[in-house]
Image: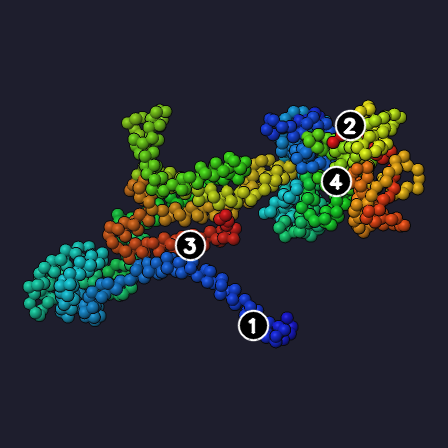
Amino acid sequence: MSSEQKILSTDGIPLEESLKQAEKKNKIKAFLLVTPLLLFLIITYIIPIADMFSRSIDDKMVTNMLPKTYKAMEQWDGKELPPEEVFEAFYLDYKILVENKTAGKLQTQLNYEKNGFKSVLKKLARKQKKFEEGNYKEQIMKVHKRWKNVDYWRAIKRRAPAYTYSKYLKGVDMYSNEDGKIVQVSEDRRIHRILWSRTLEVAFFVTLFCFLMAYPIAHLLATLPMKYSNLLMICVLLPFWTSLLVRTASWMILLQQQGLVNDFFVWIGLVADDNRPEMMYNKTGTYVAMTQILLPFMVLPLYSVMKTISPSLMRAGKSLGATPGVAFFKIYFPLTIPGIGAGCLLVFILAIGYYITPALVGGASGTLISNQIAYHMKSTLDWSFASAMGLMLLTGVLVIYWIYNKLVGVDNIKLG
Amino acid sequence: MSKKEDFVKFDKVDKSYDGRVLVVKDLNLDIEEGEFVTMLGPSGSGKTTCLMMLAGFETPTNGEIYLDKNPISNIPPHKRGIGMVFQNYALFPHMTVFENLAFPLRVRKIPKDDIDKKVEKALSMVSLSGFGNRMPGQLSGGQQQRVAVARALVFDPSVVLMDEPLGALDKNLRESMQYEIKHIHESIGVTVVYVTHDQGEALTMSNRIAVFNDGKVQQLSSPDKLYEEPVNSFVAEFIGENNTFAGEISDISNGSCKVKLDKGEIIANPISVKSVGEKTTVSIRPERALINPKDKMDNNQKGIIEEVIYHGDHTRVRLNLLGNSEFILKVPNSSQNLDIKLGNEINIGWNSHDARALDPK
């Protein structure tokens, strides 16, 4: 507009302001309506993720347990054995921990840093009661010869910072060594990278299988007359309503070596009775069960998109001279892309974090990264590592979403 | 170029979807090359089914359809070379207007230069030049309709089918599109088979109209004949307005008959009645009945005005005449000195030739 003059309402108030006032009430109402959901999201989603993040980088525990030691270590360059003050400070810190019966945590934490630390510390806990005042360096070194090894002291020093990214390095089978360089762990211990790639592979193939199976089903659902399509829809949704555990357990019954599928194969003579294939406790089992379980997540978005495609479009294509195949690939298929996008994204993201099914039917070669996370949550109690891997998984999903957005465009996705 | 008389031929075609009800019964229909034939009828009368059989999306249960003397029942739709305009346009929403029009040419592997030329020509034919890069969603209903027409014509099909193509447009647009389609048909001389339930549309556009009811063609003739000389009471009722009297033939001779009504008697033109005692429905077009006729007419009756509705160019008058209280008259606005007032008694006259004694309803 050329003129800067403000438009006034009949009362003489600038129009913009009176509009704001008029809409203020509505805005507040709208905000109050979404507040419960907002709070719910913050409490159940944002806060846990923030907590996970702080947990994954938090390394204050050791720092807080050995305050005097780390103060004394500030001057130490880490090249040779630390001076007497460090030994004395460590003795004093450790004594408090032993008296408070919290030394176990320190033992576990330092053992993560350097293998064999636990036994050394336990021995020290027993022996230090008889320590005399003064010259702690010699007394400690006498308890176990490893105390003379500078590596163990360096391990303690590495835990000095209150924050660390070492858990993330561990998640991709790397660590920062004594010199502070980031290196790979020895080849026989690189399990996480195998798990990551297997997780991606399983998620990819499960998505592919789901797509191949769901497309014809969804097409049938969208084109059948109402009474048949309702029945088919129930067939698709019925497993969806059944408990996940029940479905996984029924796959175990079907797929085990003495299971129904194998019995059937033997009966029709496909395999010999003494040579039944293993279809469970490996990747096959994971593929089969996960594809079945995630299938509805592919069918439903595809169906909702296909339902909106008018059958006259295919007819138009054919009447214009396109063979059924050409009409399908030039007309029908491009129009279903939003549904394919939504279904694939949904299935892939669900599959990448899948836990129960691989845990039950996956065996050793069919477990995924989420099983490893659960293992650290439940068995090793290394929650910070579990948090780090959980966040890496989340970041991975976000990255995939981003790539996906670049390729397909989120605007083109239709979830229903 | 001599026109082929039976370019499209339906020969004894039956169609049933469920094996119990015949949707189309013993349909025989010949369509001349270059003709504009409309299938007109109420919904469920089988007209769209006929169109779909011609297009190849439905197969006749019995009988055969011939296109240029060749039976086409076993030819799949994409090989028939028949253009089709759908009710909801069926434009491909993911393609531009240009791509939509180029689609039938591309699947026919026509060289790119020719495609450009043909598409440009087709677009200018429907006065949409310069719209090639728009998506169908960015066009108005009328423009989409014109794209659909252009797409059905761009590959020079011998026959174009149109399935209620104007049903979704508003009244004014529908009327202008009617003329536009008619002009396109006249200029390129393609054979058009058009389906509609709107009689106005059918009368405006067609060379011939096939009135469908109950799976059968009730009458196939030119629009004026259809209106002036309906052969049965369904056609008389369906096309235009109509006053009817139900009665019984009391006398029949020399091309006229007497029909005895509950109250009184009228002289009529026997169309589908042959003998005394037959039941009949007599049909008279509202404009054929005159008030206070100056000329001598063989039917003269008195009626009482029950309702007067002003319509601008004419006035509709509802009378109670011979026991029929639904008798409608159309009085042109130019008529003066007429005493059209509620409750007045007036003289009504019509020629027996215009009172057609048809089959009873």
User: Label 3 crowding class (10 Å Cα cut-off): few <14, some 14-19, many 20+?
Assistant: few
Nearest to the eye among marks 1 and 2: give it.
2
In the rendered image, the quadrant that contains the N terminus of chain A is: bottom right
Label 4, label 2: how far apart the Cα atoms are: 28 Å
Label 3, label 2: how far apart the Cα atoms are: 83 Å
Q: Is residue A76 visible?
A: no
Q: Residue at x 59, y 75 (%)?
A: A13
Left or right of A324 on screen, residue B71: right
Query: Residue lying farthest right?
Result: B295
Label 3, label 4: how far apart the Cα atoms are: 61 Å
Earlier-in-chain disc, 4 versus 2: 4
Q: Amino acid at mark 2?
A: Lys
Expressed as whole percent of the image width and height from the top left, the position of residue B32 reads: 77, 32
Label 3, label 1: how far apart the Cα atoms are: 42 Å
Left or right of B19 on screen, residue B8: right
Is label 3 in contact with label 2 (beta carbons under 8 Å)? no
Q: Which mark is residue B279?
A: 2
Label 4 sits on a secondary structure element that is: helix
Compared with residue A237, is residue A76 higher up or lower down, i.e. above or below?
Answer: below
Q: Which residue is mark 3?
A: A399
Q: Amino acid at mark 4?
A: Gln
Q: Are marks 3 and 2 on the same chain?
A: no
Q: Which residue is mark 4?
A: B199
Expressed as whole percent of the image width and height from the top left, the position of residue A231 reads: 48, 36
Q: Amino acid at mark 3?
A: Val
Q: Residue at x 45, y 38 (%)?
A: A234
Q: Which mark is residue A17?
A: 1
Q: Amino acid at mark 1?
A: Glu
Q: Are marks 4 and 1 on the same chain?
A: no
Tally of numbered tags: 4
Is label 4 in contact with label 1 (beta carbons under 8 Å)? no
